[in-house]
Amino acid sequence: MYALVTNQHGYDDKANHKLHNQNDTNEQEKKIQNLELKLQKYEQEIVHLQEELDLKTNKLIKKEKDEDGHNQLISYQNDKLLMQQAQILNQDDKIDRLLLKIATLEEQNKMAQMKSNYIIVILLCITTACITIIIQHEYYNSK
């Protein structure tokens, strides 16, 4: 009877641990999904900024035709392009950091799954040992 209670207790611990690991895995998956959404948002923002830059550049080229204005336009466009390039590089850096975070979370998820599998195997071994002890005890008591 005592061994059955212990066995049941061990089973409850395994279920709780498995639930805890599943919660960790779910949280990591949510983080990965959030990071992927942010990555998509940054990629869309880069495309939008590039389109905006192209539109503004074309408008300025059409608007400024005379020599002095043209030189100022070129200078302004160069400055604007440099600013846009800096923004794009900044977005690329953010994307790289997000990709690194995603890779790290995926690795952590794999490690958590491996730990969960090891714990399940250990609990199965303990359960098997308890059942063996109970059977041997009953067998020797029946003689």
Image: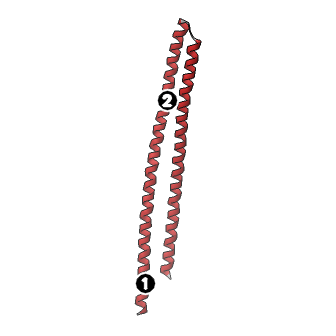
The residue under label 2 is: 88
Identity of the residue drawn at 52% across and 51% down = 29
Q: Answer with the quarter of the image where residue 51 lies.
A: top right
Label 1 sits on residue: 135
* Cα–Cα span, label 1 and label 2: 70 Å
Mark 1 residue element: helix
- Quadrant for residue 117, please give it: bottom left
Instruction: Count all numbered tags in the image, as a single digit.
Output: 2
Name the residue located 42 percent from the left edge and 59 percent from the top edge. 114
Residue at 45% of width from left, 58% of height from top? 113
Residue type at mark 1: give it: Ile
Estimate the x, y position of residue 125 in percent, counting from the top left. Answer: 41, 72
Q: Is residue 57 left or right of residue 104?
A: right
Dot 2 falls on a residue whose secondary structure is: helix
Find residue 18 and report its horizontal and vertical position in percent: 50, 63
The image shows residue 74 at horizontal and vertical percentages of: 51, 13
